[in-house]
Image (cartoon, grey):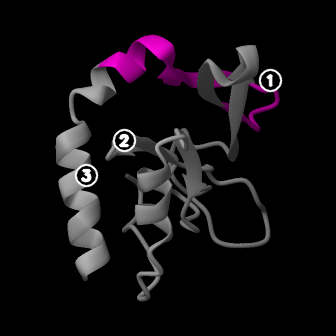
Amino acid sequence: QNEGVCHGSLNSGLFASMVERGEIKAATVGHDHCNDYCGNYLGVDLCYGGGTGYDGYGCADTPNWARRSRIIEVQDYGKTIKSYKILDDGHLTKIDEEVLFSEDKTKVDRRNRKRVERIVKEIHED
């Protein structure tokens, strides 16, 4: 985390709906210019895009920070979803490759289903 997490003040219920559907495995999130990480919440990987533009603020003043863009790669018609970032460093270096979703990972996620259902119910009650 390179800056504070920014979020809207209105809870529209969009995320609760994504979790309830059970078929959304990953989403790009946020409008933070310096955050570029992924985190899994209730079975959905939420990933910042990185710091791509040159017009707004960014982390260009941070040592060893190159502008970057997140790539989401869907393989085998959605059986596997991978993510990585490409740096604008003159070499288009690929970093931070990770598997966001795979059929094997789903078997682990199903164990948490009761917890997810409880939390989704709490979100709807707010």
Residue under pointer 3: 117
User: Viewer-proximal residue, 27 or 117?
Assistant: 117
In x, y percent, where is residue 117?
A: 25, 52
Name the residue: 24% across, 79% down.
125
Q: CA distance from mark 2 to mark 3?
A: 16 Å
Question: Is residue 15 on the magenta stretch?
Answer: no
Q: Nearer the viewer, mark 1 or mark 3?
A: 3
Label 2 sits on residue = 40
Reading the chain from its start, which is encountered first: label 1 or label 2? 2
Measure how far apart labels 1 and 3 are at the Cα level.
45 Å
* Residue range of the region highlighted in magenta in the rendering: 85-107
Q: What's the residue type where badge 1 is placed? A: His
Circle 1 sits on which residue? 91
Q: Is residue 28 left or right of residue 90?
A: left
Q: Crowding at label 2, few (<14), some or many (≥20) Cα neighbours within 10 Å? A: few
> Which class describes the residues within 10 Å of circle 1: few (<14), some (14-19), or many (20+)?
few
Is residue 21 positioned above or below 77 on the image? below
Which three-letter amino acid code belongs to the residue tagged 2?
A: Asn
Disc 1, SS: loop
> Answer yes or no: do the residues labelled 1 and 3 have beta carbons within 8 Å?
no
The C terminus sits in image quarter: bottom left
Q: Secondary structure at mark 3?
A: helix
Write down the quadrant of residue 72 in the picture: top right
Compare marks 1 and 3 and give the one earlier in the sequence: 1
